[in-house]
Image (cartoon, grey):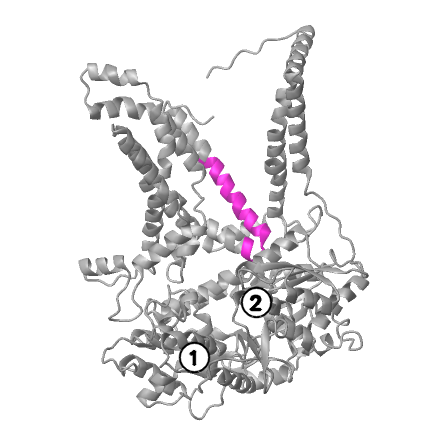
């Protein structure tokens, strides 16, 4: 990335350049006017609210006048949070859930998209594609209820539990309380996620696959490449850019686990291992109204996210891929 | 021409969007018009469709109160969240129900956002009903000794145990009176084939993920204080510092290991509490006495042979005094935000509305609707028979949530129930009230608890559940209790004691003498 050498301009030339710019703006004034609402949207709803992060440095309570010079407490919310013994636990749980998703869930839409792409019977491919989208539209509450029904342990000896519980019992001879297990919660969350989102996740990869030049395949067939070789040498490199972009975006949300799914599956027996930053912020901020503290936690999350995106982006560029920016 | 037209379109689109994004900013509060008062009320709703503004009952109520009521019904499940949001945005109704004294509520009280009505509501000439509010309950939800709201009164002796009376009869057992007898009932319900089908397909008691309810009741019966107790040095300490609480945990742990309570207690939702009682799998629920009435009503259609019994408490042993767990006596309180109610005249209008809503006529309207339209009266004893019609019930749905209802009228309407357990429920209430154990720390809010309370509670709740399910040992439970102390529990104790010391309205010596117990130290 060589920087273009800066050309020294005379004042006259500068004036001309400025004039030109103004003429261009004037010429396209309606375009700029059309841009205005979108521009304002970002200013009003994305930039201005950023002043709100100031409450992370205040002893804020709901209803406190926003523009006061009182109640500043510096970094106390942050030191409280990092000093809290639950911090490490939250970090650990969040990272486990997030990385399990990254390792086991992230590749699946790519694999599924590649599989779908190999289907040559068009009507079958279309039907299958539509079908795998369906779980995305099922509410998390419904998925949690289904999980409960399948994994339920019986209330007393002799009664029967959920379907999956009985299968596991018949296979291993052990009575496993999956819903109350501190480690099984991770697998439950992962499997729910895979079931719900894998199909939906294929959309972007299928779009990328549709853009691959057909002539390349024809040339490869002439050269004697088989289906698998075509996949490895043409298809995958063609969508590698998309995969890298998706990966970088994913890194940005590495601390986002969402709270709805976890809260639905949480109970006293697995709370220790399933409490994450998001469920914590929900509890402390929304329920208890401790906005300052939860904003501090959110701000911490955002900073980590920026670092992750930046790192992933740099690494991608180093590896010869086009980054996000 | 076309070009011009396009210009106009783009320009007007841009202007429209700009106007749209600016709208919604800024709103002014006007004081209430005394000629034509419109009062905005925010309160809890339990029904999916609460009474609508055009319902005849609502209009009758408005006529009686002399104001237009404009309700914001908030589902009870996320009520506190909504209160915090209202305080955050500063967009207040005139009368707002506050569910609990969260840190934001306390801050807003202290900063003067809500009217201090301590000395106003005592004026019996202006507010004859509000002046009857219980001093003790008002003290319980006060902030720094000042009263900021009108409470919604609730039955004090509400706790009670729902039990399968026909199972007891079949096994030749009476209603248990001591903890040992209670244990024996659970044991027999599990092993004595109470349903007489020759199979071991029943168990004793249903416990859900809402463990706190049954546990607190058991703990009180076994001699624990109510939430907070006084130790031998006259200092306040939370209930899990006392032996009775631990005894209750051990009792449940034993029951769990013997299969007398359900194995899936940690994961069963409290919404499903009745399910296995109704299906005849289990026979005991410790909760509120009126659960017995609802369960009996539901059982009528499922199993007409089943009989439901109810009792309020069991004693620790035959020689001990009976003890029961009271409710706080109130369920939230109505505050009057100065942002919506700027002057004393406005406050007077709001208070008058709530005062009138306590009248017998208003209370009957809120509870039963309009005579001959929504209900009929059956003599003797003013029994209201509600008409069984969803459209008619909807007309007054949740209005009883609006009424403060801290006054009960002897000659007011009473509900007629189909089951005979309903009368017993009333008796349980009355008997419970005689033996309630008061919580000496009820009025005090520790700052640490109001910010970290739920996280702290979670430590104890988790330890309790795991201990009962046999996942952790006794030493682990004590270790978790120590963790609670380190995480901020000690601060909560210190702050609560400081508030207790500072409270001049309480006779500390009398409290200590009544309830002093030794705290239970960590044995390891």
Mark 2 chain: B
- Whichever of callouts 1 and 2 sits on the residue coming sooner in the sequence is 1
Q: Picture coordinates of residue B219 (x, y %)?
A: 45, 78
Residue placed most toward the observer, A186 or A220: A220
Residue A292 is inside the magenta segment: yes
A1 displayed left or right of B123: left
Q: Which residue lies furthest to the front in this view?
A: B372
Q: In which quarter of the image is residue B112?
A: bottom right
Q: Which quadrant is the C terminus of chain B positioned in?
A: bottom left
Q: Which residue lies furthest to the bottom in this view?
A: B319
Residue drawn 58% across and 54% down?
A290
Q: Magenta residues: mostly which secondary structure? A: helix
Q: Picture coordinates of residue A178 (x, y %)?
A: 30, 58
Q: Which quadrant is the N terminus of chain B positioned in?
A: top right
Residue drawn 34% across and 47% down?
A190
Contact between marks 1 and 2 (CB within 8 A): the answer is no
Residue placed most toward the observer, A120 or B144: A120
Classify A36 as above or below B36.
Answer: above
Answer whether residue A182 is visible to the viewer in this image. no
Find disc 1 in the rendering and name its residue.
B162
Find disc 2 in the rendering and name its residue.
B392
Answer whether residue B296 is visible to the viewer in this image. yes
Q: Distance between the residues labelled 1 and 2?
A: 31 Å
Q: Give the magenta part as a residue range.
A: A286-308
Dots 1 and 2 on the same chain: yes
């Amino acid at each position: 990335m060589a920087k273009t050498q800066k050309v020294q301009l005379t004042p006259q030339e500068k004036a001309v350049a400025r004039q030109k710019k103004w003429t261009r703006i004037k010429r396209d004034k309606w375009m700029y006017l059309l841009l205005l609402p979108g521009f304002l949207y970002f200013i009003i709803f994305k930039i201005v609210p950023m002043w709100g992060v100031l409450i992370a440095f205040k002893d804020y309570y709901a209803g406190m006048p926003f523009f006061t010079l009182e109640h500043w407490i510096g970094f106390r919310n942050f030191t409280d949070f990092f000093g809290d013994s639950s911090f490490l636990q939250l970090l650990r749980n969040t990272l486990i859930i997030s990385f399990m998703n990254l390792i086991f869930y992230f590749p699946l839409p790519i694999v599924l998209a590649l599989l779908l792409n190999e289907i040559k019977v068009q009507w079958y491919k279309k039907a299958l594609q539509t079908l795998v989208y369906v779980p995305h539209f099922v509410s998390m509450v419904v998925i949690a209820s289904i999980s409960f029904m399948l994994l339920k342990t019986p209330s007393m000896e002799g009664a029967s539990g959920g379907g999956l519980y009985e299968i596991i019992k018949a296979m291993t001879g052990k009575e496993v309380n999956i819903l109350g297990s501190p480690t099984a919660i991770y697998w439950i969350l992962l499997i729910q996620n895979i079931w719900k989102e894998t199909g939906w996740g294929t959309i972007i990869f299928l779009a990328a696959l549709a853009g691959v030049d057909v002539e390349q395949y024809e040339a490869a067939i002439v050269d004697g490449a088989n289906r698998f070789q075509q996949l490895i040498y043409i298809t995958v490199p063609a969508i590698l850019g998309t995969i890298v972009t998706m990966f970088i975006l994913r890194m940005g949300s590495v601390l986002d686990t969402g709270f709805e799914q976890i809260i639905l599956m949480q109970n006293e027996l697995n709370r220790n291992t399933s409490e994450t930053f998001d469920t914590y912020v929900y509890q402390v901020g929304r329920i208890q109204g401790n906005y300052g503290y939860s904003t501090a936690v959110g701000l911490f999350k955002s900073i980590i996210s920026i670092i992750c995106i930046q790192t992933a982006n740099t690494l991608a560029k180093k590896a010869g891929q086009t980054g996000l920016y | 021409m076309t070009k011009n037209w396009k210009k106009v379109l783009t320009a007007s689109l841009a202007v429209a969007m700009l106007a749209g994004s600016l709208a919604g900013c800024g709103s002014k509060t006007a004081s209430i018009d005394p000629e034509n008062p419109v009062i905005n009320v925010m309160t809890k709703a339990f029904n999916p469709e609460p009474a609508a503004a055009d319902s005849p009952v609502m209009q009758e109520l408005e006529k009686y109160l002399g104001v237009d009521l404009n309700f914001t019904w908030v589902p009870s499940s996320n009520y506190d969240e909504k209160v915090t949001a209202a305080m955050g945005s500063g967009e207040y109704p005139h009368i707002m129900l506050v569910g609990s004294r969260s840190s934001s509520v306390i801050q807003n009280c202290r900063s003067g956002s809500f009217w201090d009505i301590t000395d106003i509501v005592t004026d019996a000439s202006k507010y004859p009903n509000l002046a009857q509010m219980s001093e003790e309950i008002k003290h319980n939800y006060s902030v720094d000794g000042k009263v900021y709201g009108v409470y919604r009164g609730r039955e004090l002796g509400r706790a009670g145990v729902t039990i399968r009376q026909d199972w007891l009869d079949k096994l030749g057992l009476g209603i248990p009176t001591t903890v040992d007898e209670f244990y024996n009932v659970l044991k027999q319900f599990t092993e004595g084939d109470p349903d007489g089908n020759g199979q071991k397909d029943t168990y004793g008691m249903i416990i859900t993920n809402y463990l706190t309810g049954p546990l607190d009741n058991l703990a009180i019966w076994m001699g624990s204080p109510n939430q907070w107790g006084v130790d031998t040095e006259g200092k306040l300490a939370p209930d899990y510092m006392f032996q009775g609480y631990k005894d209750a945990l051990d009792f449940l742990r034993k029951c769990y290991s013997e299969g007398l309570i359900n194995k899936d207690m940690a994961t069963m939702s409290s919404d499903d509490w009745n399910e296995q009682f109704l299906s005849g799998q289990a026979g005991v629920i410790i909760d509120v006495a009126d659960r017995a009435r609802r369960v009996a009503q539901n059982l009528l259609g499922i199993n007409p042979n089943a009989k439901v019994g109810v009792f309020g408490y069991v004693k620790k042993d035959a020689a001990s005094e009976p003890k029961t767990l009271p409710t706080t006596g109130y369920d939230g309180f109505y505050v009057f935000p100065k942002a919506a109610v700027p002057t004393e005249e406005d406050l007077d209008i709001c208070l008058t509305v709530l005062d009138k809503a306590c009248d017998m006529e208003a209370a009957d309207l809120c509870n039963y609707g309009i005579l001959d339209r929504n209900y009929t009266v059956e003599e003797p004893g003013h029994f209201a028979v509600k008409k069984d019609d969803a459209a008619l019930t909807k007309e007054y749905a949740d209005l009883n949530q609006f009424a403060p209802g801290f006054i009960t009228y002897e000659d007011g309407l009473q509900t007629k129930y189909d089951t005979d357990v309903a009368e017993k429920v009333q008796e349980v209430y009355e008997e419970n009230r005689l033996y309630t154990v008061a919580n000496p720390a009820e009025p005090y809010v520790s700052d640490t608890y109001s910010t970290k309370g739920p996280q702290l509670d979670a430590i104890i709740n988790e330890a309790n559940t795991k201990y009962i399910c046999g996942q952790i040992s006794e030493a682990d439970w004590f270790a978790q209790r120590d963790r609670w102390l380190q995480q901020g529990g000690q601060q909560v104790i210190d702050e609560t004691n400081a508030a207790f010391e500072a409270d001049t309205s309480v006779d500390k010596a009398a409290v200590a003498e009544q309830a002093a117990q030794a705290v239970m130290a960590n044995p390891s």
